[in-house]
Amino acid sequence: MLILNTLAPVFLLIATGAGLQATKFVSPGFLKEANRVTYWLGLPALLFSQLAKSFQQGGGGGVLLTAMAVATGLVILAGYGVAWLLRVPGAAAGTFVQGGFRGNLAFVGLPVIYSLPDTPLAGGMSVRTAAVLTVAPMMIFYNIAGVVVLLLSQHRLGWGMVKPFLKQLGTTPPLLATLAGITWALAGWTVPPAVDKALTALGEMALPLGLLGVGGSLASVKLGAGWRHPFASALVKTALSPLLGWAVGRALGLESMELKTLLILMACPTAIISYTMVLELKGDEALAAGAISFSVVTSLATLALIVGWF
């Protein structure tokens, strides 16, 4: 029952979003615009309010972020290895690797974690706060690494890539909200009740609306004829990624709930935004769409195993 009660709400909302888009109950751009509102308003409100209220309530969480950063680096290297073994064309290798490491942390990972009890970690920080402190910087890392792997598959590393990096950093609302929330907490300020209620309402909107947007995006993408490379990229993301996360987590001595949180985040399906980035940077569109679609299915099995086993 724990597996069903934890994962069913998440994937039912994804299915609902896909149904709304497929049946044209909503206009083609509605869920896309809703996802934009979530990304720019809802998710930053969730991050800021969570950090501003609870960042100083306890220590811990740093090892969790370290473990995920190290494990993600290993996944990127493994992705290149798998791409070489499968003879993925050079221009598509970046798309393959991005699909294998860039998880949907905000709109799948956090909802799954928020469905679990918010237990305290060894240092006193709650699981949810530790997850937020991990997700926010990892999204920044994803943005930078995503640009790197996509551009490297078409160009050599050079100064011309600096501008895209800076643009990604300067236009990432989760980063700004994270910095603002931590600063607010360290300053010892209290969020006014009226503002706190407004931010809480926006934050509560973010997760379900984001899941609807994921489903709507899945109903809109077009799969190419080939399936081997997209399926392999999805397996890197939802099977190999959590395995490497488990190895790194155990090596760093993560406690049970920290390890479970890490595995959930590592096993998330490929982020929808990776498809948008592939389009912007002229990657392999069909491979990106296929990796996202396959990863949603394969992540369901992996997440069920993680929630039920640990």
Image (cartoon, rainbow, N blue to C red):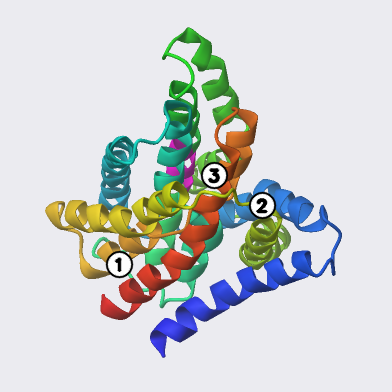
In which quadrant is the C terminus drawn?
bottom left
Q: Which residue is drawn at 55% across and 36% down?
A: 284
Tag shown at residue 240: none
Taking 206 as reference, is 22 left or right?
Answer: right
Q: Residue at x 72, y 48 (%)?
A: 36
Give coordinates of residue 42: x percent, y percent. 67, 55
Q: Read off the magenta span.
A: 136-142
Specify whether residue 18 is in view: yes
Looking at the picture, tell me which residue is in the foreground, 160 or 184. Answer: 160
Taking 207 as reference, is 76 left or right?
Answer: left
Give coordinates of residue 170: x percent, y percent. 60, 28
Q: Circle 1 sits in a helix, a strand or a loop, which is it?
A: helix
Q: Mark 2 points at which residue?
A: 221
Taking 193 as reference, is 88 left or right?
Answer: left
Q: Which amino acid does label 1 sit on?
A: Lys
Q: What residue type is labelled 2?
A: Val
Q: What residue type is labelled 3?
A: Ala
Mark 1 or mark 2: name the one nearer the start of the chain. 2
Q: Residue at x 49, y 43 (%)?
A: 187
Q: Mark 3 points at which residue?
A: 288
Specify whether residue 51 is in view: no
| Residue at the top extreme of this rendering | 159
For residue 195, above or below residue 71: below
Q: Are marks 1 and 2 in contact (CB under 8 Å)?
A: no
- Magenta stretch encompasses residue 59: no
Local packing at callout 1 (Cα closer than 10 Å; few below 14, some 14-19, many 20+) is many
Q: Name the residue under label 1.
A: 260
